[in-house]
Each structure stands twice: as C-alpha cells, then as structure tokens.
Image (cartoon, rainbow, N blue to C red):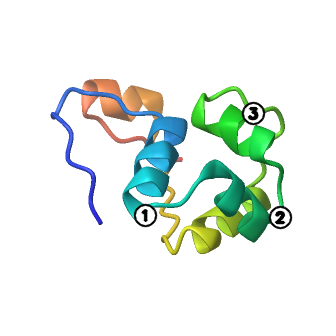
Amino acid sequence: MAILIADNARITFGETLRIYRSRAGISQQELADKAGVSRNYISLIERDMAPNLSLGVLIRIAEAANSKLDISFKQKDSVSTGESRTE
C-alpha cells in the first residue's frame, strides 16, 4: 500500500502510521496489543509526540500492522544543495 503525496508535501511518521492503520481497518488498541505497547503510546506516536521512540518499537509496530519499515537517512546539506559529501 503506497501513500501518494505531492512532491513538496511533508508527511510525518505519525501521520503515515495513522494512515496505514486506518486503511488496514485496525484500531489504536488493536495495534497496541499486537505491538506490545499501550494505546496511549500509539496515540502519542501518531501525533508525533512520543518520547523515546526506539527502532525496536517501530519494528514491532510495523510487523503488527503487516507493513514494512523502510528507513533512509539523508544529509541535510545534500538534500538542500543537491551536492554529495564524501569523507
């Protein structure tokens, strides 16, 4: 399931999670139970307010939502200038 957004639009992880969860037809409580976290924590994540969000929790949430977690890192200066840095 792909989420299509405009080229210049920004979408947060929390917004993405909410969209995927809603499209999958599962409640925050169901996702929380499957991922081993509280419903309140899922709510905080969806509002981009979760403290100490770990990679392990992200993986469990993705697995619970039958989704693949895809993470990439980009250098800020490379993104803004189009230049790449090598060290």
Q: Which residue is mark 3?
A: 50
The image quarter containing residue 49 is top right
Q: CA distance from mark 1 to mark 2?
A: 18 Å
Q: Which residue is mark 2?
A: 36
Horizontal relation, residue 75 to residue 51: left or right: left
Position of residue 40 relative to residue 62, above or below, is: above
Q: Is residue 86 visible?
A: no
Position of residue 7 relative to residue 86, above or below, is: above
x, y percent for residue 58: 68, 58
Q: Secondary structure at mark 2?
A: loop
Q: Amino acid at mark 1?
A: Ala
Q: CA distance from mark 2 to mark 3?
A: 15 Å
Horizontal relation, residue 84 to residue 12: left or right: left
Q: Secondary structure at mark 1?
A: helix
x, y percent for residue 2: 27, 60
In front: label 1 or label 2:
1
Q: Secondary structure at mark 3?
A: loop
Q: Which mark is residue 43?
A: none
Q: Amino acid at mark 3?
A: Ala
**Neighbour tally class for label 1: few under 14, some 14-19, many 20 plus, Cα within 10 Å:** few
Q: Which mark is residue 24?
A: 1
Whether tag 2 and tag 3 are in contact, CB under 8 A, the answer is no
x, y percent for residue 38: 83, 49
In front: label 1 or label 3:
1
Q: In terms of sequence position, does the residue under pointer 1 or pointer 3 come before the other? A: 1
